[in-house]
Amino acid sequence: MKTTLATLALTFMLTASFALGHGGVELGPQGGRILEFSKNESMHGEVTVKDGKFHIAVLDKDMKPVALADQSLTATGGTRQKPEKLTVEKTDTGFVLPAVEPGQWLIVQFKENAKAKAITARMEYDTSTCEACDAAEWVCKCTQNKEKTKDAKAGK
């Protein structure tokens, strides 16, 4: 019984912290959201939006662009009840795909080559504006402690 209650309490606390704490996302050199494309942080994807499309640049461990050769990316958007495979176009330095609707999740699977195991990355496309930094939530620049940022902005 104690184990069940402790597990339930821990689950609730973790869920609440994810729901309230949006900070801590890593931003790339172009100001886009960084997704991990490797297990050892040697390959990243930087997601930006332009003209209603996601542009995903592939970056190395030093956040420098990587020329694409054998790499591939598949993407899914939509809702949990109705997921939709997105059309992905490959460019010299990344991938272009239609942006999902605000509030939906983008799920991508990146492969370094045809024989490599796919790395899955997820991102919620939350376009609401952060009160503390005035950026869209999906690329919010705030730290984990949002209240400190609000207080600093208010001059407290």
Image (cartoon, rainbow, N blue to C red):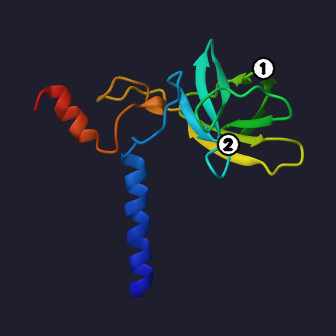
Res. 56 in view: yes
**Residue 44 vs residue 146: left or right?**
right
- Determine which quarter of the picture holds residue 56: top right
The residue under the point 34% across, 23% down is 134
Label 2 to label 1, Cα distance in Å? Answer: 17 Å
Q: Mark 1: few, some, or many residues within 10 Å (few <14, many ≥20)?
A: few
Specify the label residue 3 is tagged with.
Answer: none
Location of mark 2 (residue): 37
Q: 138 or 41, which is in the foreground?
A: 41
The residue under the point 53% across, 26% down is 32
- Determine which quarter of the picture holds residue 140: top left
Secondary structure found at label 1: loop
Location of mark 1 (residue): 92
**Residue 35 vs residue 71: left or right?**
left
Mark 2 vs mark 1: which is more N-terminal? Answer: 2
User: At which x and y percent is residue 128?
Assistant: 43, 27
The residue under the point 68% across, 47% down is 38
User: At which x and y percent is residue 102?
Assistant: 55, 28
Secondary structure found at label 2: loop
- Residue type indicated by callout 2: Phe
- Determine which quarter of the picture holds residue 130: top left
Res. 80 in view: no
Quadrant where the image shows the C terminus: top left
